[in-house]
Image: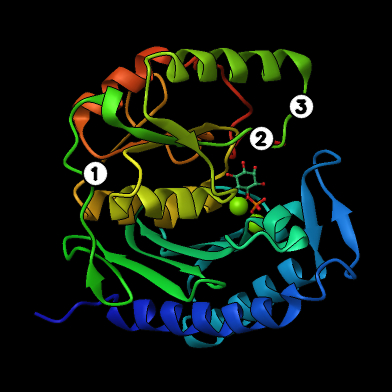
Amino acid sequence: MTDIWQSAMDHAVALARKAGQVVRDAVGDAQKEAVMVKSSSIDLVTQTDQKVEKLIIQSVKEKFPTHCFIGEESVAAGEVCVLTDSPTWIIDPIDGTTNFVHTFPFVAISIGFSVNKQVEFGVVYSCLQDQMYTARRGKGAFCNGRPLRVSHEKDIRQAIIATEFGSNRDPGVVDKVFSSLKRVVSIPVHGVRGAGSAAINMCLVASGCVEAYYEIGIHVWDIAAGSLIVSEAGGVLMDVDGGLLDLMSRRVLAANNQSVAEHLAKEIDAFRVRRDDAAS
Ligand SMILES: O=P(O)(O)O[C@H]1[C@H](O)[C@@H](O)[C@H](O)[C@H](O)[C@@H]1O
Ligand SMILES: [Mg+2]
Ligand SMILES: [Mg+2]
């Protein structure tokens, strides 16, 4: 049976590769680039983020003129952020902008594609590592064409957990983040890591390198593609409170299996943040 979204997915992979070249060409000069700030002094954006998002959206508009978009830098520029049932490209042009600015080598282009609010395919290109992660709903997850499978570990005490500090440094939020982190470290788990990119953290779960990843404060463009890559690699997704994942809630927990996920959820202070689709 033909896959009606195959040509869109092929286009996403080609665009991610092209965007990756733009990012690789710029990374050496990133420190010379004008670094601007968005929601806070540590929420960074560069001209390369904006250039890559434009490149992707322009090209998709030419090929699929009826499709919708949610793009990180377009939303920052005032576009609405609402996930509808229409075919929608959900784009993070550089996931890991802070890494990009500092030449820390985990930088990704993340492209998710949803229809009826369900992610149909996800593409995450870790461009400095030249690793192309892809997933098509119902057809598995791959890295450079190699099938991905999550870790078999069932005991969270034998696990590595990925998380991030995020870009909100309000003292109350920092306290909550650290109190969760203290509980997770004290389970005790084998270790805690963070790549500095939500999309790459999710691909690490899908690859079996880490058992789980959680974060509060991410956005739909950080996790849309990665969420499908995790589930197609056999993993589970949920809200940090153990409920159902809501892509717009800005909270995510991805794990290799239900038992690790549920144990982790019990340790997290699941505070609420303003939703991506909250009326502005
Ligand atoms: O803004 P970009 O696209 O680089 O993405 C974010 C990361 O993906 C988060 O995990 C991370 O915690 C940061 O919030 C970071 O901003
Ligand atoms: Mg991001
Ligand atoms: Mg980004």
Q: Which residue is labeled 1 in the image?
A: 235
Earlier in the chain: of badge 1 and badge 3, it is 3
Say above or below: 174 vs 251: above
Mark seen at residue 16: none
Mark seen at residue 279: 2
Picture coordinates of residue 278, whole percent (x, y) = 62, 33
Say above or below: 115 vs 251: below
| Helix, strand or loop under label 3 | loop
- Residue at coordinates 76% horizontally, 58% vertically from top-left? 102
Alpha carbon distance from label 3 to label 2: 23 Å
Alpha carbon distance from label 1 to label 3: 30 Å
Picture coordinates of residue 184, whole percent (x, y) = 44, 19
**CB within 8 Å, label 1 to label 3:** no
Alpha carbon distance from label 1 to label 2: 32 Å
- Residue at coordinates 67% horizontally, 76% vertically from top-left? 23
Foreground label between 3 and 2: 3
Q: Quadrant of residue 114?
A: bottom left
- Can residue 269 be seen from the camera position used here? yes
- Can residue 83 be seen from the camera position used here? no
The reply to whether the residue tagged 2 has its Cβ within 8 angstroms of ligand 1 is no
Q: Which residue is labeled 3 in the image?
A: 169
Q: Residues within 10 Å of mark 2 (few under 14, many from 20)?
A: few
Earlier in the chain: of badge 1 and badge 2, it is 1
Say above or below: 26 vs 96: below
Image-based side of 46 in relation to 68, left or right = right
Earlier in the chain: of badge 3 and badge 2, it is 3
| Helix, strand or loop under label 2 | loop
Q: Residues within 10 Å of mark 1 (few under 14, many from 20)?
A: many
